Image (spheres, helix red, strand yellow):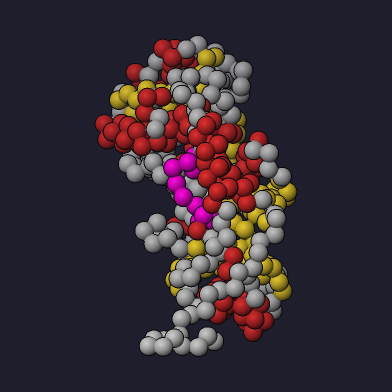
């Protein structure tokens, strides 16, 4: 312990910094069904993809690549970096090992910390007790750190009180401790402040675009646009705008952060932005409040001029007005989100009519529950392109086959 200064108390010792390796073990966490999409976008970025599992994608990255993944991923939920991995069958072993974790790599003096724990088939299965022992290790290494408590799920993220998330995973008595490099979940691009009914996460909208896929080469129409998430994500993609360009990331606050490298990545991303989408992207909704929200969000995202935003009923949607080829991609109302019944069945039937009126060059993609009763009202042949969850509900992206005619199915 350092000697007290004259006239005052002892100053807490600064945490001893441990240098990072040239490459870190990273893991891109994603929603169910999204791992192949995240792996594909990592490969498109030139990143070395390792194991692809249901939970996400493993990668070995430099810090420039780690920042690039956070900046550019449209489909990942967050990116974590492994700090330590060890066996622990009792709490005494866990506490000793936790004290040896190189916390100073990610925690500066006075940092606030949240610990998230999951335990699977391990002797140590009480997540709160595990979090408590890990917290002791953190405070022992970084004496001025403040551990806020055990964060139980991603909905606990608090943007008003920035903190470093530590992820602890027990699997068959092996403990892996990782630091979140993203901060707020990556779907929080920074532009969606206005929200309509049944909002869609930005990452889910991007996943729909990727799974269909839509390559910004034909018009896109969303007749149930809500707060505009699908169309705004499409415009960002069409203009090659990095989804994370307007937000910060946790790794920028790490003590050894190569800030010049991160700044260079942002400069390179801004240089890639195209002046316009170059293809019609149309957002429609019958609700005036939804249209106002879509316009406000599009303005914050910097793509308002790239969108056609119109108030109107589904039956007034004329796909042929936007071209003889295109994609109708939407998240229509369904029973779990809004009141169902005969009116909802009629709405889906009209959606099928709108698609067929557009002609052979128009393709449909829509996010609905696995129950095909409503989808059957369209009377078109649909195939699953993506299975995932939305707001805790299982959903699937159903799509007409590329190159097929949207004529009525038998």
Magenta residue check for 250: yes
* Residue 399 visible in the snapshot: no
Could you tell whether 393 is left or right of 89 in the image?
left
Along the viewing direction, whichever of 41 and 201 lies nearer the viewer: 41
* Residue 59 visible in the snapshot: yes
Quadrant of the rendered structure where residue 140 is? Answer: bottom right
Which residue is found at the position 48% from the left and 73% from the top?
145
Residue 407 location in percent, x, y? 54, 16
Q: Which residues are magenta?
A: 243-252
Which residue is found at the position 38% from the left and 19% from the top?
317
Vertical placement of residue 174 versus 51, above or below: below
Along the viewing direction, whichever of 254 and 219 lies nearer the viewer: 254
Quadrant of the rendered structure where residue 17 is? Answer: bottom right
Quadrant of the rendered structure where residue 309 is? Answer: top left
Magenta residue check for 150: no
Residue 73 location in percent, x, y? 56, 42
Vertical placement of residue 78 versus 358, above or below: below
Which residue is found at the position 57% from the left and 60% from the top?
256
* Image label count: 0
Vertical placement of residue 64 versus 181, above or below: above
- Magenta segment's dominant SS is loop
Residue 158 location in percent, x, y? 40, 59
């Amino acid at each position: 312990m350092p000697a007290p200064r004259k006239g005052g108390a002892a100053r807490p010792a600064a945490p001893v910094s441990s240098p990072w390796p040239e490459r870190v073990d990273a893991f891109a966490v994603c929603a169910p069904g999204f791992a192949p999409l995240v792996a594909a976008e990592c490969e498109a970025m030139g990143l070395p993809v390792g194991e692809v599992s249901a939970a996400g994608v493993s990668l070995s990255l430099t810090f420039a690549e780690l920042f690039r993944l956070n900046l550019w991923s449209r489909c990942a939920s967050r990116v974590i970096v492994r700090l330590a991995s060890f066996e622990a069958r009792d709490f005494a072993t866990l506490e000793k090992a936790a004290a040896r974790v190189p916390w100073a790599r990610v925690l500066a003096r006075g940092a606030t910390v949240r610990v998230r724990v999951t335990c699977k088939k391990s002797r140590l299965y009480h997540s709160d007790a595990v979090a408590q022992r890990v917290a002791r290790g953190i405070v022992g290494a970084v004496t001025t750190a403040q551990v806020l408590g055990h964060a139980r799920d991603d909905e606990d993220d608090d943007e008003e009180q920035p903190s470093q998330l530590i992820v602890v995973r027990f699997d068959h008595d092996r403990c892996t401790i990782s630091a979140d490099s993203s901060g707020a979940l990556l779907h929080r691009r920074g532009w969606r402040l206005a929200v309509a009914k049944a909002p869609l996460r930005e990452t889910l909208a991007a996943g729909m675009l990727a799974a269909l896929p839509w390559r910004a080469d034909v018009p896109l129409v969303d007749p149930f646009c809500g707060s505009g998430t699908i169309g705004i994500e499409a415009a960002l993609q069409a203009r090659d705008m990095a989804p994370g360009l307007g937000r910060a990331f946790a790794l920028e606050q790490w003590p050894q952060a190569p800030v010049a490298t991160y700044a260079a990545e942002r400069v390179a991303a801004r240089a890639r932005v195209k002046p316009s989408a170059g293809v019609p992207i149309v957002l429609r909704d019958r609700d005036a409040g939804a249209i106002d929200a879509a316009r406000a969000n599009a303005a914050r995202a910097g793509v308002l001029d790239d969108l056609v935003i119109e108030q109107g009923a589904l039956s007034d949607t004329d796909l042929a007005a936007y071209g003889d080829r295109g994609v109708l991609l939407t998240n229509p109302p369904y029973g779990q989100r809004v009141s169902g019944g005969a009116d909802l069945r009629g709405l889906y039937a009209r959606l099928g009519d709108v698609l067929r009126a557009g002609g052979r060059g128009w393709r449909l993609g829509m996010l609905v529950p696995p129950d095909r009763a409503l989808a059957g009202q369209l009377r078109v042949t649909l195939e699953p392109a993506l299975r995932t969850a939305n707001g805790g509900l299982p959903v699937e992206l159903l799509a007409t086959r590329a190159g097929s005619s949207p004529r009525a199915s038998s």
